Image (cartoon, rainbow, N blue to C red):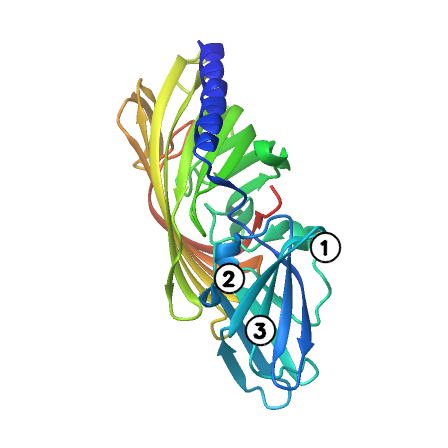
Amino acid sequence: MFMKIMSSVIVAILFSHLAISAYGFDEGNLVFVIRGAALTPGPRSSTIEVIFGKDVPSEEALKKKENWLIRTINLEDGAEARFIPDEVTVAQTPSVGRLPSLIINKTLDPKRERITIRLQLPNFPEFTIGEPKKTGARAAFAAAKGKSDADIYFSGTSVGARGSKPLYSFESKLGYLFSLNRWGSFGPRAEVDAASESNIDPDSIMASATYEKIFVLGRAEGLILKSDVVGLEFDKSNRNRNVTTELDGTLVLPPKRFGEGTFAAFDFMAGFEGGHNYRHKLNSEGLGNFWRWKFGANAYFVMLHPPKFKRINFSTEYKVRLLRSAEPFTETIDGKDITTLRKKPRHYVGSDLDLMVSDAIGITLKYRYGSLPPAFKFVNHTLSAGITFQLKQANK
């Protein structure tokens, strides 16, 4: 049964890839990095040439003046100005591909001004004139909009008291996908949600070999096809153990702009999970094969360069799993964990407010409700605060 599910997933991946490609959608990415920028000042105007990393936005998106923002800060008095370029041209070069040039009808002086340029699309990449060209990790990773959007994520809290063990909880994601060029990307991925006390946070550990393909449908819109081809689900005590495979598609919509530095973005997901349960708390022999439909949505609100912070992210994730057979469900009643077998839908809600002091590091306020596989340990409205590290891979 499990091999049949895996075969179905592989066939579905190939069919989806061929079917979507047949309609001629642009290949590319929805995450960009500005690796460098060169300023050529003139007596009446200035030109900024922008160099992107592995992926470059479409020519249509680059040429639209409203997609760019130039921010200058006077180094003497701190006066700030923000404006869009007066014209944008795009040249095709053999070395870097599309090379946009921003033309401004005023003289800019990097010796007297700190000049930052930003593309007001997908992940809002920016670069400051005079900084070293981004290479290595700086060119491979970009700021994430929240936990659901991140490829590398760690957020932890710890509370200590005299005479007792510290209470901790943490959530983490770690993944790196290697580019297969036009065929997508493939690599390892893992997620851990755990805590020292059973009623604090979900108890969920997942590891998988993941395939991902991004189909760009517009200037900032796309379909992300993802499959955890072979994966493991287990809890902290290893009392629940699943071998799984899954396939889902996420529709990413263009961000909605509110002013110069505030954005809202949304995406919607649908897919399925299937596999085999080899062990669970109520039966060491396991439940056998299982199948789940899953649906979800994410909402992101991003404020760039607010007072005191590099950015502020607010993200909300909702996911529901519709079980085709009964699986374990654990809830805390009168201080005790009670596990039963149920078929009811499993809901999960997570909301994060990230106060980012850099692209990667910030302070997070978190709200959690619901349960995650394999134990589906129910968390009933928890609030916490912690330190967060998050980044999104840009060179898939």
Q: Earlier in the sequence, mark 1 or mark 2?
A: 2
Q: Is residue 240 visible?
A: no
Q: Earlier in the sequence, mark 3 or mark 2?
A: 2
- Secondary structure under badge 3? strand
Q: Which residue is mark 1?
A: 135
Depth check, mark 1 against mark 3: the one in front is: 3
Q: Amino acid at mark 3?
A: Ile
Q: Amino acid at mark 1?
A: Thr
Name the foreground residue: 310 vs 32: 32
Q: Is residue 30 visible?
A: yes
In what quadrant of the picture does the N terminus appear? top left
Q: Amino acid at mark 2?
A: Lys
Residue 144 appears at what percent x and percent y? 52, 53
Q: Horizontal placement of 8 versus 53: left or right?
A: left
Residue 46 appears at what percent x and percent y? 62, 78
Q: Which residue is mark 3?
A: 103
Q: Which residue is mark 2?
A: 63
In what quadrant of the picture does the C terminus appear? top right
Count of number-bearing discs: 3
Q: Horizontal placement of 105 versus 299: left or right?
A: right
